Image (tube, helix red, strand yellow):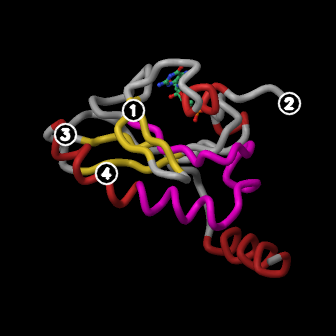
Amino acid sequence: MSDSLFTKIINREIPADILYENDYVIAFLDINPNSPGHSLVVPKVEAEDILSSSDESLLEVMKVVKKIAPTIVESVGAQGFNLIANTKPAAGQVVMHTHFHIIPRFENDGLKHWPHIESTSEQRADLAKQIVEKL
Ligand code: 5GP
């Protein structure tokens, strides 16, 4: 299997604006940001998505998110951030190497959250029952 784009960044075969790196994780600015400071936090062990990354790998990623997100937010003058892991192409995942987006958010920045769908209390109860039975 050939190296992913992000493994190439880890190996310095492709340049990136690296913010932080340790033995397990690298973080760098997204090349096509949704907001100033939009960053990607990536485990060094290559896996297709969060479902195939190890728990240990994801724990290391979350430690780095907690470490760097406040500084990113402060550096761009934001007031919050969204933490997103697009998982599978249907959810918009393009780079098949586990990563989390840190997207700084500004009060009144106009970005809208997901639209809501109709759901009745019966539908939600049925769905919850189905899921609980499978877990
Ligand atoms: P996904 O849609 O897979 O969750 O997000 C992949 C992200 O990787 C996108 O936001 C895209 O802008 C970013 N990206 C793609 N190619 C490069 C690159 O070569 N360098 C950097 N820094 N980011 C990239």
Rendered-image quadrant of the C terminus:
bottom right
Give the residue pinned by disc 2.
1
Mark toward the start of the polypeptide (4 vs 1): 1
Residue at point 64%, 32% (across, down): 7
Give the residue pinned by disc 4.
69
Amino acid at pointer 2: Met
Instruction: Establish if 72 lies above or below 4.
Output: below
Residue at point 70%, 35% (across, down): 96
How far apart marks 4 and 1 lie (CA) works out to: 14 Å
How far apart marks 3 and 4 lie (CA) works out to: 20 Å
Q: Position of residue 112 (x, y in %)?
A: 37, 39
State whether label 4 is within 8 Å of ligand 1. no
Q: 10 Å neighbourhood of mark 1: few (<14), some, or many (≥20)? A: some
Mark toward the start of the polypeptide (3 vs 1): 1
What segment is highlighted magenta in the picture? 39-64
Checking the image for residue 34, the label placed there is: none
Whether residue 45 sits left or right of residue 129 in the image: it is: left
Give the residue pinned by disc 3.
108
Mark toward the start of the polypeptide (2 vs 1): 2
